[in-house]
Amino acid sequence: MPGERRAGLLLHPTSLPGAFACGDLGHEAYRFVEFLAAAGCSVWQMLPVGPTGDGGSPYQSTSSHAGNPELISLDWLRDRGWLQTVNADRPREEQLRAAGAAFAQQPAADFGDFCTRQAHWLEDFALYSALKAAHGGSPWTAWPAAERDRDPAVLAAARRRHAPVVAQVYFEQYAFCSQWRELRAYAHEHGVRLFGDLPLFVAHDSADVWATPQAFLLDEDGEPQYVAGVPPDYFAVDGQRWGNPHYRWDWHQAQDFAWWRARVATQAQRFDLLRIDHFRGLEAVWMIPADAPTAVTGAWQAVPGAALLDAITQAFPDLRLVAENLGIITPEVEALRRRFGLPGMVVLQFAFDGDASNPHLPHNHARDDVAYTGTHDNDTTCGWFDSAPPATAQRTLDYLGLPGEAMPWPLIRAALASVAELAVLPVQDLLGLGSAARMNTPGTVQGNWCWRLAAGQLTAPLAARLGELLKLYGRS
Protein backbone atom coordinates (compact mmCIF):
# COMPACT_ATOMS: atom_id res chain seq x y z
CA MET A 1 0.00 0.00 0.00
CA PRO A 2 2.73 2.49 -0.93
CA GLY A 3 1.89 6.17 -0.63
CA GLU A 4 -0.74 5.71 2.11
CA ARG A 5 -0.26 6.52 5.79
CA ARG A 6 -1.77 3.70 7.81
CA ALA A 7 -1.75 2.33 11.32
CA GLY A 8 -2.12 -1.20 12.61
CA LEU A 9 -2.19 -3.26 15.77
CA LEU A 10 -0.09 -6.33 16.50
CA LEU A 11 -2.07 -9.14 18.13
CA HIS A 12 -1.66 -12.85 17.54
CA PRO A 13 -5.03 -14.66 17.30
CA THR A 14 -4.03 -17.01 20.14
CA SER A 15 -4.04 -13.93 22.41
CA LEU A 16 -7.71 -13.20 21.78
CA PRO A 17 -10.12 -13.78 24.69
CA GLY A 18 -11.97 -17.06 24.93
CA ALA A 19 -13.02 -19.99 27.06
CA PHE A 20 -10.22 -22.32 25.97
CA ALA A 21 -6.44 -22.32 26.31
CA CYS A 22 -5.94 -19.89 23.44
CA GLY A 23 -7.95 -17.55 21.27
CA ASP A 24 -9.41 -18.62 17.95
CA LEU A 25 -10.95 -17.38 14.71
CA GLY A 26 -14.42 -17.08 16.19
CA HIS A 27 -16.50 -14.21 17.53
CA GLU A 28 -13.67 -12.42 19.36
CA ALA A 29 -11.64 -12.21 16.13
CA TYR A 30 -14.56 -10.43 14.48
CA ARG A 31 -14.89 -8.10 17.47
CA PHE A 32 -11.20 -7.24 17.12
CA VAL A 33 -11.70 -6.37 13.45
CA GLU A 34 -14.54 -4.08 14.51
CA PHE A 35 -12.31 -2.43 17.14
CA LEU A 36 -9.64 -1.81 14.51
CA ALA A 37 -12.17 -0.27 12.16
CA ALA A 38 -13.70 1.87 14.91
CA ALA A 39 -10.28 3.31 15.74
CA GLY A 40 -9.38 3.90 12.10
CA CYS A 41 -6.69 1.20 12.05
CA SER A 42 -6.44 -0.58 8.72
CA VAL A 43 -3.87 -3.32 9.44
CA TRP A 44 -4.00 -6.36 11.72
CA GLN A 45 -0.52 -7.83 12.15
CA MET A 46 0.00 -11.28 13.64
CA LEU A 47 2.60 -14.03 14.02
CA PRO A 48 2.75 -17.24 11.93
CA VAL A 49 -0.51 -19.19 12.17
CA GLY A 50 0.74 -22.73 11.56
CA PRO A 51 0.43 -25.64 14.01
CA THR A 52 2.99 -25.36 16.79
CA GLY A 53 5.25 -28.03 18.23
CA ASP A 54 6.69 -28.34 21.72
CA GLY A 55 6.94 -24.99 23.46
CA GLY A 56 4.15 -23.41 21.46
CA SER A 57 6.39 -21.20 19.33
CA PRO A 58 4.67 -20.10 16.11
CA TYR A 59 8.16 -19.95 14.60
CA GLN A 60 8.63 -23.71 15.08
CA SER A 61 5.64 -25.01 13.16
CA THR A 62 5.08 -28.58 12.03
CA SER A 63 4.01 -27.29 8.60
CA SER A 64 4.59 -24.26 6.39
CA HIS A 65 1.13 -24.66 4.89
CA ALA A 66 -1.22 -26.00 7.55
CA GLY A 67 -3.25 -23.85 9.90
CA ASN A 68 -3.12 -24.28 13.65
CA PRO A 69 -6.13 -26.42 14.66
CA GLU A 70 -6.15 -24.64 18.04
CA LEU A 71 -7.38 -21.57 16.14
CA ILE A 72 -10.47 -23.36 14.82
CA SER A 73 -13.63 -21.87 16.29
CA LEU A 74 -15.88 -24.50 17.83
CA ASP A 75 -18.77 -22.04 17.69
CA TRP A 76 -18.37 -21.93 13.90
CA LEU A 77 -18.55 -25.73 13.75
CA ARG A 78 -21.68 -25.71 15.92
CA ASP A 79 -23.31 -23.06 13.76
CA ARG A 80 -22.83 -25.28 10.72
CA GLY A 81 -24.29 -28.34 12.37
CA TRP A 82 -21.09 -30.39 12.83
CA LEU A 83 -21.08 -29.95 16.61
CA GLN A 84 -24.16 -30.11 18.82
CA THR A 85 -22.90 -27.94 21.68
CA VAL A 86 -19.70 -26.16 22.73
CA ASN A 87 -18.62 -27.13 26.23
CA ALA A 88 -15.81 -25.11 27.81
CA ASP A 89 -15.25 -27.87 30.37
CA ARG A 90 -14.66 -30.54 27.74
CA PRO A 91 -11.27 -30.80 25.98
CA ARG A 92 -11.20 -28.99 22.64
CA GLU A 93 -9.60 -32.01 20.97
CA GLU A 94 -12.54 -34.22 21.89
CA GLN A 95 -14.99 -31.69 20.49
CA LEU A 96 -12.97 -31.32 17.30
CA ARG A 97 -13.01 -35.09 16.85
CA ALA A 98 -16.75 -35.16 17.41
CA ALA A 99 -17.18 -32.48 14.77
CA GLY A 100 -14.91 -34.42 12.43
CA ALA A 101 -17.03 -37.53 12.81
CA ALA A 102 -20.19 -35.56 12.02
CA PHE A 103 -18.48 -33.91 9.06
CA ALA A 104 -17.52 -37.32 7.67
CA GLN A 105 -21.22 -38.20 7.55
CA GLN A 106 -22.19 -34.94 5.86
CA PRO A 107 -19.15 -33.18 4.35
CA ALA A 108 -19.33 -29.70 2.89
CA ALA A 109 -20.02 -29.39 -0.82
CA ASP A 110 -16.63 -27.84 -1.56
CA PHE A 111 -14.59 -30.28 0.54
CA GLY A 112 -13.50 -32.39 -2.41
CA ASP A 113 -12.31 -29.34 -4.31
CA PHE A 114 -10.39 -28.17 -1.24
CA CYS A 115 -8.63 -31.54 -0.93
CA THR A 116 -7.65 -31.47 -4.60
CA ARG A 117 -6.30 -27.93 -4.51
CA GLN A 118 -4.30 -28.49 -1.32
CA ALA A 119 -3.11 -32.04 -2.05
CA HIS A 120 0.46 -30.90 -2.75
CA TRP A 121 1.00 -30.37 0.98
CA LEU A 122 -2.07 -31.77 2.73
CA GLU A 123 -1.42 -35.44 1.91
CA ASP A 124 2.05 -35.35 3.47
CA PHE A 125 1.00 -33.25 6.44
CA ALA A 126 -1.95 -35.51 7.28
CA LEU A 127 0.17 -38.65 7.17
CA TYR A 128 3.00 -36.98 9.09
CA SER A 129 0.50 -35.96 11.79
CA ALA A 130 -0.95 -39.48 11.97
CA LEU A 131 2.46 -41.14 12.21
CA LYS A 132 3.68 -38.66 14.79
CA ALA A 133 0.64 -39.39 16.94
CA ALA A 134 1.11 -43.14 16.48
CA HIS A 135 4.71 -42.82 17.69
CA GLY A 136 3.80 -40.88 20.81
CA GLY A 137 4.88 -37.52 19.47
CA SER A 138 8.41 -38.62 18.58
CA PRO A 139 10.17 -36.63 15.84
CA TRP A 140 10.17 -38.20 12.40
CA THR A 141 13.88 -39.04 12.67
CA ALA A 142 13.01 -41.47 15.51
CA TRP A 143 10.42 -43.39 13.49
CA PRO A 144 11.19 -46.80 11.97
CA ALA A 145 13.62 -46.35 9.07
CA ALA A 146 11.08 -47.25 6.39
CA GLU A 147 8.69 -44.55 7.61
CA ARG A 148 11.47 -42.07 8.27
CA ASP A 149 12.87 -42.59 4.77
CA ARG A 150 9.42 -42.63 3.12
CA ASP A 151 9.29 -46.11 1.62
CA PRO A 152 6.27 -45.85 -0.76
CA ALA A 153 4.74 -49.23 0.11
CA VAL A 154 5.12 -48.64 3.85
CA LEU A 155 3.57 -45.17 3.59
CA ALA A 156 0.64 -46.50 1.57
CA ALA A 157 -0.02 -49.11 4.25
CA ALA A 158 0.30 -46.49 6.98
CA ARG A 159 -2.19 -44.24 5.20
CA ARG A 160 -4.73 -47.09 5.23
CA ARG A 161 -3.95 -48.09 8.82
CA HIS A 162 -4.30 -44.54 10.12
CA ALA A 163 -7.18 -43.51 7.86
CA PRO A 164 -9.36 -42.07 10.68
CA VAL A 165 -6.58 -39.76 11.91
CA VAL A 166 -5.72 -38.72 8.35
CA ALA A 167 -9.39 -37.92 7.71
CA GLN A 168 -9.54 -35.83 10.89
CA VAL A 169 -6.54 -33.77 9.77
CA TYR A 170 -8.20 -33.16 6.40
CA PHE A 171 -11.34 -31.98 8.18
CA GLU A 172 -9.44 -29.68 10.55
CA GLN A 173 -7.52 -28.03 7.72
CA TYR A 174 -10.73 -27.55 5.75
CA ALA A 175 -12.35 -25.92 8.79
CA PHE A 176 -9.34 -23.67 9.39
CA CYS A 177 -9.12 -22.52 5.78
CA SER A 178 -12.86 -21.91 5.55
CA GLN A 179 -12.91 -19.89 8.76
CA TRP A 180 -9.87 -17.92 7.68
CA ARG A 181 -11.41 -17.08 4.31
CA GLU A 182 -14.55 -15.76 6.01
CA LEU A 183 -12.58 -13.74 8.58
CA ARG A 184 -10.39 -12.18 5.90
CA ALA A 185 -13.45 -11.21 3.87
CA TYR A 186 -14.97 -9.60 6.97
CA ALA A 187 -11.75 -7.70 7.62
CA HIS A 188 -11.71 -6.43 4.03
CA GLU A 189 -15.32 -5.29 4.36
CA HIS A 190 -14.17 -3.17 7.31
CA GLY A 191 -11.16 -1.76 5.51
CA VAL A 192 -8.69 -3.92 7.43
CA ARG A 193 -5.79 -5.74 5.78
CA LEU A 194 -4.12 -8.80 7.31
CA PHE A 195 -0.36 -8.69 7.87
CA GLY A 196 1.28 -12.10 8.26
CA ASP A 197 4.71 -13.45 9.11
CA LEU A 198 6.86 -15.87 7.10
CA PRO A 199 9.69 -17.48 9.12
CA LEU A 200 12.77 -17.85 6.95
CA PHE A 201 13.46 -21.33 8.29
CA VAL A 202 11.18 -24.27 9.00
CA ALA A 203 11.23 -26.63 11.98
CA HIS A 204 13.30 -29.77 11.64
CA ASP A 205 10.48 -31.89 13.06
CA SER A 206 7.95 -30.87 10.44
CA ALA A 207 6.09 -32.30 7.51
CA ASP A 208 8.11 -29.95 5.29
CA VAL A 209 11.47 -31.55 6.11
CA TRP A 210 10.14 -35.11 6.33
CA ALA A 211 8.40 -34.83 2.94
CA THR A 212 11.29 -33.10 1.13
CA PRO A 213 14.55 -34.01 2.90
CA GLN A 214 16.53 -33.32 -0.27
CA ALA A 215 15.77 -29.62 0.20
CA PHE A 216 17.81 -29.47 3.45
CA LEU A 217 21.34 -30.11 4.68
CA LEU A 218 20.74 -33.41 6.47
CA ASP A 219 22.81 -36.49 7.16
CA GLU A 220 21.79 -40.03 6.19
CA ASP A 221 19.64 -40.34 9.32
CA GLY A 222 17.77 -37.12 8.59
CA GLU A 223 19.54 -35.08 11.26
CA PRO A 224 20.75 -31.55 10.46
CA GLN A 225 24.40 -31.07 9.61
CA TYR A 226 24.14 -27.41 10.52
CA VAL A 227 21.45 -25.48 12.36
CA ALA A 228 20.23 -21.90 12.06
CA GLY A 229 20.52 -19.04 14.48
CA VAL A 230 22.25 -15.72 14.93
CA PRO A 231 25.53 -14.72 16.58
CA PRO A 232 25.58 -12.73 19.85
CA ASP A 233 23.46 -9.58 19.60
CA TYR A 234 21.19 -7.22 21.54
CA PHE A 235 18.85 -10.04 22.53
CA ALA A 236 21.32 -12.73 23.66
CA VAL A 237 25.01 -12.62 24.66
CA ASP A 238 25.55 -16.18 23.39
CA GLY A 239 23.52 -15.58 20.26
CA GLN A 240 20.45 -17.62 19.47
CA ARG A 241 20.62 -21.28 18.45
CA TRP A 242 17.25 -21.95 16.84
CA GLY A 243 17.97 -25.50 15.72
CA ASN A 244 16.29 -25.26 12.30
CA PRO A 245 18.03 -27.10 9.45
CA HIS A 246 19.66 -25.10 6.69
CA TYR A 247 18.57 -25.28 3.07
CA ARG A 248 20.34 -26.88 0.15
CA TRP A 249 20.22 -23.65 -1.79
CA ASP A 250 21.66 -25.21 -4.94
CA TRP A 251 18.74 -27.67 -5.02
CA HIS A 252 16.18 -24.89 -4.55
CA GLN A 253 17.74 -22.77 -7.28
CA ALA A 254 17.83 -25.73 -9.68
CA GLN A 255 14.08 -26.19 -9.02
CA ASP A 256 13.45 -22.50 -9.78
CA PHE A 257 12.45 -22.14 -6.12
CA ALA A 258 9.25 -24.13 -6.66
CA TRP A 259 9.20 -25.24 -3.00
CA TRP A 260 9.42 -21.61 -1.89
CA ARG A 261 6.83 -20.40 -4.36
CA ALA A 262 4.37 -23.01 -3.11
CA ARG A 263 5.08 -21.95 0.48
CA VAL A 264 4.47 -18.27 -0.28
CA ALA A 265 1.35 -19.11 -2.31
CA THR A 266 -0.28 -20.49 0.83
CA GLN A 267 0.47 -17.27 2.72
CA ALA A 268 -0.74 -15.12 -0.17
CA GLN A 269 -4.14 -16.81 0.20
CA ARG A 270 -4.24 -15.62 3.82
CA PHE A 271 -2.52 -12.26 3.96
CA ASP A 272 -2.29 -8.91 2.19
CA LEU A 273 1.12 -8.08 3.63
CA LEU A 274 3.80 -10.58 4.61
CA ARG A 275 6.82 -9.97 6.82
CA ILE A 276 9.89 -12.02 5.91
CA ASP A 277 11.28 -12.91 9.32
CA HIS A 278 15.10 -12.86 9.57
CA PHE A 279 15.40 -11.15 6.18
CA ARG A 280 19.16 -10.83 6.62
CA GLY A 281 19.24 -14.61 6.06
CA LEU A 282 18.42 -13.99 2.40
CA GLU A 283 21.85 -12.40 2.00
CA ALA A 284 23.84 -14.71 4.28
CA VAL A 285 22.96 -17.22 7.01
CA TRP A 286 24.70 -18.04 10.28
CA MET A 287 25.58 -21.74 10.03
CA ILE A 288 26.10 -23.39 13.43
CA PRO A 289 27.54 -26.92 13.53
CA ALA A 290 24.75 -29.19 14.75
CA ASP A 291 26.83 -30.41 17.70
CA ALA A 292 27.66 -26.89 18.93
CA PRO A 293 25.85 -26.09 22.20
CA THR A 294 25.46 -22.35 21.51
CA ALA A 295 25.34 -20.00 18.55
CA VAL A 296 28.74 -18.50 19.32
CA THR A 297 30.41 -21.07 17.05
CA GLY A 298 29.30 -20.47 13.50
CA ALA A 299 30.09 -18.82 10.19
CA TRP A 300 28.25 -16.71 7.64
CA GLN A 301 27.39 -18.41 4.35
CA ALA A 302 26.08 -16.49 1.34
CA VAL A 303 22.73 -17.54 -0.17
CA PRO A 304 21.00 -16.73 -3.49
CA GLY A 305 18.49 -14.38 -1.91
CA ALA A 306 18.21 -12.10 -4.94
CA ALA A 307 17.25 -15.01 -7.18
CA LEU A 308 14.68 -16.19 -4.62
CA LEU A 309 13.13 -12.74 -4.28
CA ASP A 310 12.99 -12.45 -8.06
CA ALA A 311 10.99 -15.68 -8.20
CA ILE A 312 8.65 -14.64 -5.37
CA THR A 313 7.95 -11.08 -6.52
CA GLN A 314 7.29 -12.21 -10.09
CA ALA A 315 4.91 -14.95 -8.92
CA PHE A 316 3.04 -12.72 -6.42
CA PRO A 317 3.07 -9.13 -7.68
CA ASP A 318 0.12 -8.12 -5.46
CA LEU A 319 1.57 -9.45 -2.19
CA ARG A 320 3.24 -6.65 -0.24
CA LEU A 321 6.46 -7.93 1.37
CA VAL A 322 8.13 -6.38 4.42
CA ALA A 323 11.70 -7.14 5.48
CA GLU A 324 12.48 -7.85 9.14
CA ASN A 325 15.88 -6.16 9.04
CA LEU A 326 16.68 -6.06 12.76
CA GLY A 327 19.88 -7.30 14.36
CA ILE A 328 23.24 -7.48 12.59
CA ILE A 329 22.45 -5.78 9.29
CA THR A 330 25.18 -5.19 6.74
CA PRO A 331 25.23 -2.83 3.75
CA GLU A 332 24.73 -5.89 1.54
CA VAL A 333 21.51 -6.79 3.34
CA GLU A 334 20.18 -3.25 2.97
CA ALA A 335 21.17 -3.21 -0.71
CA LEU A 336 19.17 -6.41 -1.24
CA ARG A 337 16.16 -4.93 0.53
CA ARG A 338 16.28 -1.71 -1.48
CA ARG A 339 16.81 -3.56 -4.74
CA PHE A 340 13.38 -5.11 -4.32
CA GLY A 341 11.75 -2.05 -2.75
CA LEU A 342 10.86 -3.80 0.49
CA PRO A 343 9.94 -1.74 3.56
CA GLY A 344 12.14 -2.34 6.59
CA MET A 345 11.43 -2.11 10.31
CA VAL A 346 12.32 0.53 12.89
CA VAL A 347 11.65 -0.05 16.60
CA LEU A 348 11.51 2.87 19.00
CA GLN A 349 12.64 0.81 21.96
CA PHE A 350 15.98 0.45 20.15
CA ALA A 351 16.30 4.17 19.45
CA PHE A 352 17.70 5.70 22.62
CA ASP A 353 20.86 3.74 23.45
CA GLY A 354 23.22 5.52 21.06
CA ASP A 355 23.73 8.87 19.39
CA ALA A 356 21.70 10.92 16.94
CA SER A 357 22.62 8.62 14.04
CA ASN A 358 20.66 5.69 15.49
CA PRO A 359 18.41 4.51 12.61
CA HIS A 360 15.53 3.80 14.98
CA LEU A 361 15.24 7.45 16.07
CA PRO A 362 12.21 9.06 14.40
CA HIS A 363 14.23 11.76 12.64
CA ASN A 364 16.08 8.98 10.77
CA HIS A 365 12.97 7.08 9.67
CA ALA A 366 12.12 6.73 5.98
CA ARG A 367 8.71 6.63 4.33
CA ASP A 368 9.16 3.00 3.36
CA ASP A 369 9.79 1.93 6.97
CA VAL A 370 7.30 0.22 9.26
CA ALA A 371 7.55 1.93 12.65
CA TYR A 372 6.92 0.03 15.89
CA THR A 373 7.03 0.94 19.54
CA GLY A 374 8.13 -2.67 20.10
CA THR A 375 7.63 -6.10 18.55
CA HIS A 376 6.58 -9.49 19.90
CA ASP A 377 10.24 -10.08 20.83
CA ASN A 378 10.47 -6.89 22.90
CA ASP A 379 9.26 -6.18 26.38
CA THR A 380 6.15 -4.05 26.51
CA THR A 381 6.91 -0.34 26.30
CA CYS A 382 5.99 0.19 29.97
CA GLY A 383 8.14 -2.77 30.98
CA TRP A 384 11.02 -1.56 28.83
CA PHE A 385 10.89 2.00 30.14
CA ASP A 386 10.56 0.95 33.77
CA SER A 387 13.64 -1.29 33.53
CA ALA A 388 15.74 0.99 31.29
CA PRO A 389 19.01 2.40 32.67
CA PRO A 390 18.41 5.90 34.04
CA ALA A 391 20.48 7.49 31.27
CA THR A 392 18.43 5.75 28.59
CA ALA A 393 15.17 6.72 30.26
CA GLN A 394 16.26 10.36 30.51
CA ARG A 395 17.48 10.42 26.90
CA THR A 396 14.08 9.05 25.85
CA LEU A 397 12.23 11.77 27.73
CA ASP A 398 14.56 14.51 26.45
CA TYR A 399 14.09 13.36 22.86
CA LEU A 400 10.31 13.22 23.22
CA GLY A 401 10.20 16.73 24.66
CA LEU A 402 9.74 15.86 28.34
CA PRO A 403 6.15 14.74 27.78
CA GLY A 404 3.52 15.13 30.45
CA GLU A 405 1.78 11.87 29.52
CA ALA A 406 2.90 8.67 31.19
CA MET A 407 4.39 5.85 29.15
CA PRO A 408 3.52 4.26 26.79
CA TRP A 409 1.61 7.14 25.18
CA PRO A 410 4.65 9.33 24.37
CA LEU A 411 6.23 6.45 22.47
CA ILE A 412 2.92 5.64 20.77
CA ARG A 413 2.70 9.25 19.61
CA ALA A 414 6.27 9.09 18.32
CA ALA A 415 5.49 5.97 16.28
CA LEU A 416 2.33 7.50 14.84
CA ALA A 417 4.08 10.80 14.08
CA SER A 418 6.88 9.06 12.20
CA VAL A 419 7.18 9.63 8.45
CA ALA A 420 6.98 5.85 8.08
CA GLU A 421 3.89 5.07 6.02
CA LEU A 422 2.87 2.23 8.34
CA ALA A 423 3.01 2.38 12.14
CA VAL A 424 2.17 -0.72 14.19
CA LEU A 425 1.46 -0.87 17.92
CA PRO A 426 1.37 -4.05 19.99
CA VAL A 427 -2.00 -4.25 21.73
CA GLN A 428 -0.16 -4.59 25.04
CA ASP A 429 1.22 -1.08 24.52
CA LEU A 430 -2.17 0.31 23.63
CA LEU A 431 -3.38 -1.06 26.97
CA GLY A 432 -0.37 0.28 28.90
CA LEU A 433 0.59 -3.16 30.23
CA GLY A 434 3.80 -4.10 32.00
CA SER A 435 6.34 -6.87 31.53
CA ALA A 436 3.92 -9.59 32.62
CA ALA A 437 2.18 -9.12 29.27
CA ARG A 438 5.33 -9.71 27.22
CA MET A 439 4.76 -12.18 24.36
CA ASN A 440 8.26 -13.61 23.93
CA THR A 441 11.75 -13.36 25.39
CA PRO A 442 14.24 -14.47 22.70
CA GLY A 443 16.66 -17.16 23.76
CA THR A 444 14.25 -18.65 26.31
CA VAL A 445 11.78 -21.53 25.97
CA GLN A 446 9.56 -21.16 29.02
CA GLY A 447 6.68 -18.75 29.60
CA ASN A 448 6.39 -17.47 26.05
CA TRP A 449 3.48 -17.14 23.58
CA CYS A 450 0.82 -17.39 26.30
CA TRP A 451 -0.34 -13.81 26.93
CA ARG A 452 -4.11 -13.39 26.62
CA LEU A 453 -6.29 -10.36 26.11
CA ALA A 454 -9.11 -10.21 28.63
CA ALA A 455 -12.68 -9.81 27.47
CA GLY A 456 -13.75 -6.18 27.56
CA GLN A 457 -10.25 -4.66 27.62
CA LEU A 458 -10.62 -3.10 24.17
CA THR A 459 -13.27 -0.50 24.91
CA ALA A 460 -15.05 2.11 22.82
CA PRO A 461 -13.31 4.99 24.70
CA LEU A 462 -9.93 3.40 23.94
CA ALA A 463 -10.84 3.12 20.25
CA ALA A 464 -11.89 6.77 20.31
CA ARG A 465 -8.64 7.86 21.97
CA LEU A 466 -6.57 5.96 19.41
CA GLY A 467 -8.77 7.22 16.60
CA GLU A 468 -8.12 10.85 17.56
CA LEU A 469 -4.38 10.23 17.42
CA LEU A 470 -4.67 8.54 14.02
CA LYS A 471 -6.54 11.58 12.69
CA LEU A 472 -3.97 13.91 14.25
CA TYR A 473 -1.09 12.12 12.56
CA GLY A 474 -2.84 11.46 9.25
CA ARG A 475 -3.24 7.72 9.61
CA SER A 476 -7.01 7.35 9.94
Image (cartoon, helix red, strand yellow):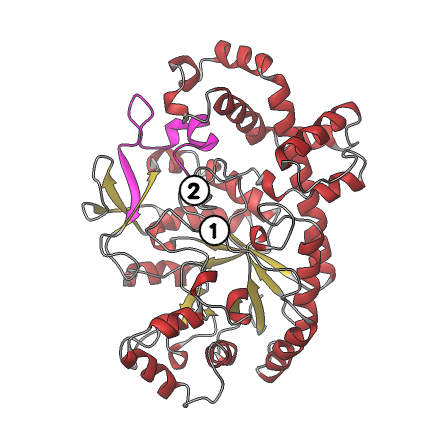
**Residue 458 in which image quadrant:** bottom right
Residue 449's tag is: 1
Q: Which mark is residue 422?
A: none
Q: Position of residue 206 (x, y in %)?
A: 45, 32
Task: Using the image, determine if residue 42 lies above or below residue 361.
Answer: above
Q: Quadrant of the N terminus?
A: bottom right
* Side (left or right) of 435 relative to 74: left
Q: Is 309 left or right of 421, judged from the image as shown?
A: left
The region drawn magenta spans 202-229
At a point 48% along the width and 61% down the height, the residue shown is 437
Query: Is residue 261 depicted above or below 380 in this figure?
Result: above
Q: Considering the image in quadrants, where does the C terminus appear?
A: bottom right
Judge whether 219 appears above or below 2 on screen. Answer: above
| Secondary structure of the residue carrying numbered label 1 | loop
Residue 386 locus on image (x, y percent)? 38, 74
Q: Is residue 127 above or below residue 160?
A: below
Regarding residue 115, the answer to whether it shows in the image is: yes
Q: Is residue 218 magenta?
A: yes
Look at the numbered discs 1 and 2 and tell me whether their residues touch, using CB distance below 8 Å.
yes
Name the residue at 80% across, 26% down. Answer: 106
Q: Using residue 240 as the reference point, say whether residue 476 is left or right of it.
A: right
Residue ID for mark 2: 55
Alpha-carbon span between mark 1 and mark 2: 9 Å
Q: Amino acid at mark 1?
A: Trp
Instruction: Determine crowd level at label 1: few under 14, some 14-19, many 20+ residues with C-alpha closer than 10 A.
Output: many
- Identity of the residue furthest to the left in this view: 297
- Secondary element at tag 2: loop
Q: Is residue 318 visible?
A: no
Q: Residue at x 41, y 90 (%)?
A: 401
Q: Looking at the picture, which amino acid does disc 2 mark? A: Gly
